[in-house]
Amino acid sequence: MQLLGLLKTTILCSTTWQGWTVISAIAALVAAIVAIFYTYYTYNLLNANEETLAKSNKINEFQIYKEISASLGSDEATKLIDLCGEGKLEIDYSNTTPLAGETKIKSGFLNRKLLNPLEDIAVFWESGLITIKTIDSGFGYKILCIGNCEAIMNHVLKSRQSWPNVFSGFEALYNEVYSKCADEEKQGYRDKFIKVEEPAK
């Protein structure tokens, strides 16, 4: 009788063990399928978020571009850029002349209409809100024309006597735009915004 009970227990344990093995295998298979679906869903969600973020960044870049374009495209800014290109710009530091003359421009007016917006472009670029490619495509010529003007360079150097880092963003922007130009586009422009003269030997 005891032998029969031991045999039943052995058979029961053997049957139970095989059942748990099957259940474990099914559970592992279901867990793997769920993990695959979860990974696929998460991956698609991440891609959708990246696409949305990229689109949002492009919209922001376009808005910044429009604002800068309006600022640098104003009649006053266009006149100043033309004077820079023609080498006729004169900067007045006194308080006696009108706001803007024919070629003699008050320094504060020049800063507000031209140099401050260019410094804003540099801040947007350094923050990653607008790319150098976009800046170069839309404003490259203007940046080089303004930065190459001797009067502008002297104005920045004079301003730095009081504020050492003033317009440093624009300086970096000019240098970067120049470096991205093809060789034939570089002709007639300084390779650096602030050209440091080499001491005579």
Image: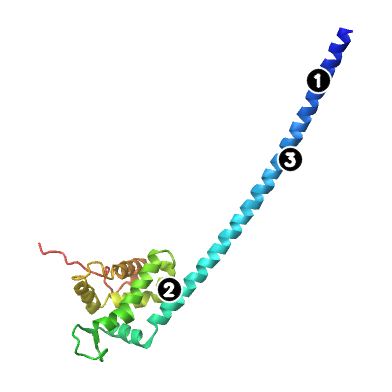
Image quadrant occupied by the N terminus: top right
| Callout 1 secondary element | helix
User: Which disc number belongs to residue 192?
Assistant: none
Q: Which mark is residue 30?
A: 3
Front position in the image: 24 or 150:
24
Q: Which mark is residue 14?
A: 1
Q: Are marks 1 and 2 in contact (CB under 8 Å)?
A: no
For the residues labelled 3 and 1, the Cα–Cα distance comes to: 25 Å
- Residue 48: which quarter of the image? bottom right
In this picture, residue 182 sits left or right of residue 198 = right
Q: Is residue 122 visible?
A: yes
Query: Quick one: label 3, few (<14), some, or many (20+) residues within 10 Å?
Result: few
Residue at image location 74% in from the left, 33% down from the top: 25
Q: Please report contact status of discs 3 and 2: CB closer than 8 Å, yes or no.
A: no
Badge 1, how many Cα within 10 Å: few under 14, some, many 20+? few
Pointer 1 or 2: first along the chain: 1
Q: Give the SS element for disc 3.
A: helix
**C-alpha gap between disc 1 and disc 2:** 78 Å
Label tally: 3
- Residue located 67% across and 44% down the image: 35
Give the residue at mark 2: 137
Is residue 88 visible in the rendered structure shown here? no
Residue 121 location, quadrant: bottom left
State the image coordinates of residue 12 (x, y, percent, origin top left).
84, 20
Q: Is residue 137 left or right of residue 103?
A: right
What amino acid is found at the position of numbered circle 1 in the picture? Ser
Query: Considering only vertical position in the picture, is 74 above or below 117?
Result: below
Q: Position of residue 188 (x, y in %)?
A: 28, 75
